[in-house]
Each structure stands twice: as C-alpha cells, then as structure tokens.
Image (cartoon, rainbow, N blue to C red):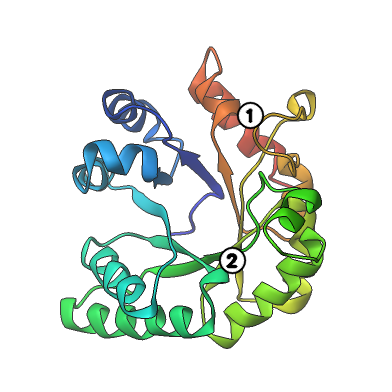
Amino acid sequence: MKLNPLILALDVEAKVAKSLIEELKDTIDIFKIGSRLFTEAGPEAIDWVHAQGKKVFLDLKFHDIPLTAAESSRHSARLGVWGFTIHTSGGFAMMKAVVQSVQEESVIQKKIKPFIFGVTVLTSLSELELKEVGVNFSPAAQVERLVLLAKKAELDGIVSSGLEIEIARKSGENNFLIIVPGIRSGEELKIEDQKRVMTPQNAIKLGANFLVVGRPILEAKDRIKAAQKLLEQIRF
C-alpha cells in the first residue's frame, strides 16, 4: 500500500498525542514521534500508533560516537518503526555503523528494515548561525556535502529544508528518499523558529517524498479537514 506523503509531527504532550492519533488515523499514515513526546511517554507512544495500524517516524536524531549511535539505532529497529533519524554531521563512520547494526538487527528480529534518514541542516539554522558553529558554507552547500556522505554510507534518505530539495535530489539517486519539514501553507510562510520553510505544493513539485507537518494541522479548528486540504493541494 502506498503511503500518503504527510507525516504528522506529534510534538505535543502525551495525552494530546494519543488523542490526535485516534482522531487522525483515517487521514494520516505516518506519525512523527520526536524527543518531546518520546522523553515523556517513551516506547509506549510508538505502541499507540501501531495499535491503530499506522507507521512511526522516530525522529530522535542520533548523533554520538559510532558504537552508541549504532546500538541506539539497533533498539529503534527492534521497536518496529517505519523510519528514524540520525545526524549526518556525525560523520561517515557513525552513519555506516548505524546502517550495519540496523541491517543485522532486522534479520535477527525478522522485521522489515526501517528507513534510515540523515538530518542535514536543521530548518532553524540560517547561514549566519552555521558560521557561528564553524560551518563556513551556505546551507545549500552544506546540504550537498552531507547528502553525498549519506549516500556513501548507504542511508535510505535525508531530512532537509525544502529550499535544498533540488540539490539533494541532484546529489542522490532516484530511490533516495527526501523528507521535508518546515512545511507551511501560503498564508503561513512567516518566520518562527524555522527559517527555511516552504509550501507543500512546491516541496512535492521539487521532488520531496514526504512532508513533516505540525502547526498547519495541529492549530487548525478542524484538523481532519486541514489534513485533507493539504493532501488535495499536493495531488497533481
């Protein structure tokens, strides 16, 4: 079954998340569980999604020494998630260790291997802020470098701003998956905590496979209708 491209970001309190999963289970196929929800509810939050027959995008962005990142990823595979994230800036050795551990664990557990997505440059970072942490490249140039490294390590895809989709698509294979956060509707393209944002229509046109959406759905008066409207906008 083909999954629809919307990934709902459950960056809310646990009791709210549980209610949202139940409310939107017929509209959303993949739910994102990030550090906010996971540190409150733990693996139980994953069970809530699986209980509704839906998939989990575990967005904990592992970034550590290769062994630690690999073992954390191994546990993610045991949890049966659809996909999870690591930071590409952790380097080639870390990414390769993660890929190997997940492949091994998936065979041991007799489960489908989860997709491993490398986070490139956070959508909250501008060129100036990259320079503040010693990265003397534009976000686009840094994304290109990290995509090539992720490909070399055999990751399944990357997480990147919509503004760098074309660069990521050019640097990756056709089957290289691209997840784009920072999705806003046309009237909501205002600067908040995320600086490099894009409309859902443009992201899909440029080559994104999946879109992480939070506020445009979560803050809507009718969340189901808001999700359905987004889906209509990206079906060409």
Three-letter code for the amino acid on which mark 1 is drawn: Lys
- Of all residues, the one furthest to the top in this rendering is 221
What residue is disc 2 on? 158
On the rendered structure, is 77 left or right of 119?
Answer: left
Between the C-alphas of marks 2 and 1, the distance is 26 Å
Q: Residue at x 74, y 25 (%)?
A: 188
Q: Position of residue 5 (x, y in %)?
A: 56, 50
Three-letter code for the amino acid on which mark 2 is drawn: Ile
What residue is disc 1 on? 229
Check the image and report above or below for 87 versus 172: above
Q: Position of residue 9 (x, y in %)?
A: 47, 39
Quarter of the view holding residue 167: bottom right
Q: Position of residue 89 (x, y in %)?
A: 57, 69
Residue 164 visible somewhere in the drawing? yes
On the rendered structure, is 78 left or right of 81?
Answer: left
Specify the label residue 173 is tagged with.
none
Q: Residue at x 72, y 30 (%)?
A: 185
**Tag 2–tag 1 contact (CB < 8 Å):** no
Badge 2 marks a residue whose secondary structure is strand
On the rendered structure, is 114 left or right of 131?
Answer: left
Mark 1 surroundings within 10 Å by alpha-carbon count, few (fewer than 14), some (14 through 19), many (20 or more): few
